[in-house]
């Protein structure tokens, strides 16, 4: 199935009756916080599975999955996915490995964010996005090839949109980044890393 940017693939609280394998594009995983804001939990790209935990345990979806850009996924019924894991232990180990890697990533981010101010958290996230989703130009600048809004960056860093806007103003002022509507370009990686550390 194909989804346009911002199209919902799975909804938080929905039955976990299928998984999705991302064939093209990038999806974002979000969950509502206690105060009604949207937390960005992760990004998944080509070849990655989403919705596998709910499908294994049969629990309602703990998060929503949205297309960030033009996305194509293969939807597989949960029962088929479960049967495949039981019939192919190597596949089960691969899924377990992916889940553990995500857990470690989440723990690492939580540790990095502990005691960091918003500017440091935004800088850390931008450095990570440049590494994982960056497109380097001839002049050395790196465009983050994802249409993320300041609201989404706020959700990923546990900050308010206003605090994220202030952090971007500071990063632009020191020449670390340039921004346009849902477009971020890293102009000076060293300056960004200095703010992240």
Image: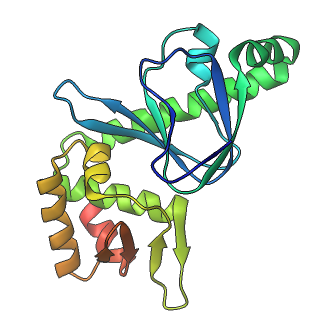
Image location (x, y in percent) of residue 53: 57, 19
Please state which of residues 29 and 76 is positioned toward the viewer in this rendering.
76
**Residue 9 in the figure: left or right of residue 95:** left
Residue visible at 29% across and 29% down in the picture: 32
- What is the total number of numbered labels drawn onto the structure image? 0
**33 sits left or right of 144 in the view:** left
| Quadrant location of the C terminus in the rendered image | bottom left
Q: Residue at x 49, y 91 (%)?
A: 139
Q: Residue at x 30, y 75 (%)?
A: 179
In-front residue for pair 94/13: 13
Q: Is residue 71 above or below residue 59?
A: below
Which residue reaches farthest top? 58
Q: Residue at x 57, y 34 (%)?
A: 101
Which of the 4 image quadrants contains residue 109? Answer: top left
Say whether residue 103 is visible.
yes
Residue 197 seen in the figure: no
Answer left or right for 95 relative to 178.
right
Quick one: which residue is furthest to the right in this view?
Answer: 87
Measured as percent of width and height from the top left, residue 84 is found at 82, 18
| Residue 44 image point, x, y percent | 56, 44
User: Closest to the observer: 60 or 163?
Assistant: 60
Q: Quadrant of the N terminus?
A: top right
Q: Is residue 85 above or below residue 30?
A: above
């Amino acid at each position: 199935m194909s989804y346009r940017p911002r199209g919902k693939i799975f909804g938080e609280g929905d039955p976990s009756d299928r998984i999705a394998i991302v064939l093209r594009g990038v999806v974002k995983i979000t969950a509502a916080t206690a105060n009604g804001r949207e937390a960005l939990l992760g990004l998944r790209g080509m070849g990655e599975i989403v919705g596998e935990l709910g499908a294994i345990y049969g629990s309602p979806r703990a998060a929503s999955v949205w297309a960030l850009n033009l996305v194509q996924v293969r939807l597989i019924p949960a029962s088929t996915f479960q049967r495949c894991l039981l019939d192919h232990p190597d596949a089960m180990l691969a899924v377990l490995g992916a889940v553990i890697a995500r857990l470690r990533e989440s723990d690492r981010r939580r540790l990095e964010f502990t005691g960091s101010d918003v500017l440091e958290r935004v800088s850390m996230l931008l450095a990570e996005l440049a590494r994982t989703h960056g497109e380097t130009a001839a002049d050395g600048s790196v465009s983050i090839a994802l249409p993320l809004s300041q609201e989404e960056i706020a959700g990923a860093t546990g900050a308010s949109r206003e605090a994220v806007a202030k952090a971007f103003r500071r990063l632009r002022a020191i020449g670390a980044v340039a921004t346009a509507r849902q477009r971020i370009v890293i102009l000076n990686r060293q300056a960004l890393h200095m703010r992240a550390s």
